[in-house]
Image (spheres, rainbow, N blue to C red):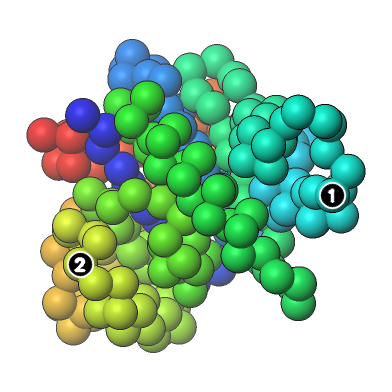
Amino acid sequence: MTKSIAVAGKGGTGKSTIASLLINRLVERGMKPVLAVDADPDCNLGMLLGSGEIETIGDLREELLRNIKDFPAGMTKANYIESGLHQIIGEYEGYDLITMGKGEGASCYCYINSLIRKFCDDLTPAYPWVIIDNEAGLEHLSRRTTTDIDALIVVVNESPLSFSCGEKIKEIISDINGRIEKIYVVTSMVNPRRLSEVHKRIKGLQMEHLADIPRNGEIEEVVFNGQPIREVKGPSLIKEIDRIINKIGG
């Protein structure tokens, strides 16, 4: 049975870093293959995973809209679109990556989007774990481009703006009609002397506090240098990532 985790929060809180740490740790623990979905228009997940450049669904959507009248004879529109979707799935060691890319423009995407949603829904059961790196607005979830979510992780740091974003995420969730089973809060790289105060603020969000991802100089260095973080270790870091996996997977 597939377990799905969506990670959301204000930009700069480290949500993409946490999503990539979860993916790397799941692969490390043999809980693979993992389906990684980069649903943030900034498209940082692939870089953090070391996946390199990958075509996005946004790019494919535009290409299909331009060429849909000229697809090969004998091929249905649905088959043509599905063929393109298969080609943009990046296959790597222990995980596959789908990058959503830019949002919709002014053109009509209704037919293409319905097929993309069906494709994603059909694809998900083939993986024991799905990790989705979302933007704060949860567009990927609110547009029903994925199946239901077992756990939404809201990432906060010591900035009050991250808590304000958490409140807005709660409002969005109320409009998604119960598609998210459980909501958790995870702190990201908070200064240890401020951690107790951040924990007090978490109570105001009325979400279960799940883990504290500690400050890690090695992570900050590799992210700054644009390097993949799969080699970043540290007992306290692994302990907190395992806490998330065990809670949701258990």
Left or right of 193, for residue 215: right
Farthest residue to the left: give it: 250
Labels 2 and 1 touching (C-beta < 8 A): no
Q: Which residue is mark 2?
A: 178
For label 1, the SS is helix
Residue 85 drawn at (x, y percent): 65, 36
Tell me the amino acid under the disc marked 1.
Answer: Lys
Name the residue rendered at 29%, 58% in the picture.
Answer: 152
For label 2, the SS is loop
Name the residue rendered at 50%, 40% in the picture.
Answer: 119
Residue 69 image label: 1
Residue 142 image label: none
- Check the picture and name the quadrant holding the N terminus: top left
Farthest residue to the front: give it: 74
Label 2 – label 1 distance at C-alpha = 38 Å
Residue 54 drawn at (x, y percent): 74, 36
Q: From the viewer's perspective, is residue 200 above or below residue 213?
A: below
- Check the picture and name the quadrant holding the C terminus: top left
Tell me the amino acid under the disc marked 2.
Answer: Gly
